[in-house]
Amino acid sequence: MIRRRTDFSHLERIFTSVVLHFVKSKLKNIVGQRVRKARARSKPPLTQKELSTRVVKCGADIDRAGIAKIETGIRRVYDFELLALAKALGVTVNALLRHSRSL
């Protein structure tokens, strides 16, 4: 029996499609949206890199790409990271968790 090399490119396309659908869906973690708003409202506004540096100083190892993924809902946040994010942004944990329009 001769085995052919299987082409998995169709599986890669399906996986990519599922991931993109998940990212674009409305089922995102609200913490990311709140982090983005708090970062933009700080005086002066923080870049993702600046926030990452502050978060690291607060005890959570999140790089700039991690901040971007949190803000877009791709990456979830652990409880200790939530504490570090709140401290780095100068807001309460509740401000990052509550689902309201004001910060």
Image (cartoon, rainbow, N blue to C red):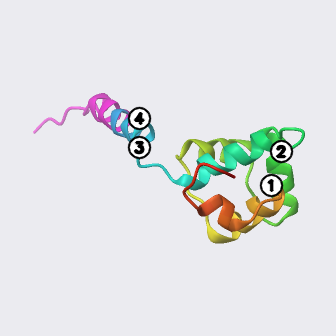
- Kind of residue indicated by mark 4: Leu
Label 2 residue SS: loop
Q: Give the residue at the far left of this rendering.
A: 1
Kind of element beneath mark 3: loop
Residue under pointer 3: 26
Residue 20 is marked as 4
Nearer the observer, 72 or 30: 30
Residue at 81% in and 48% down:
51
> Residue 53: where, in percent of width, then height?
85, 50
Residue drawn at point x = 36 percent, y = 37 percent: 21
- The stretch in magenta equals 1-16
Labels 2 and 4: the sequence-earlier one: 4
Eye-nearest disc, 3 or 2:
2
Image-based side of 41 in relation to 97, left or right: right
N-term-proximal mark, 1 vs 4: 4
Q: Are marks 3 and 2 in contact (CB under 8 Å)?
A: no
Disc 1 vs disc 4: Cβ atoms closer than 8 Å?
no
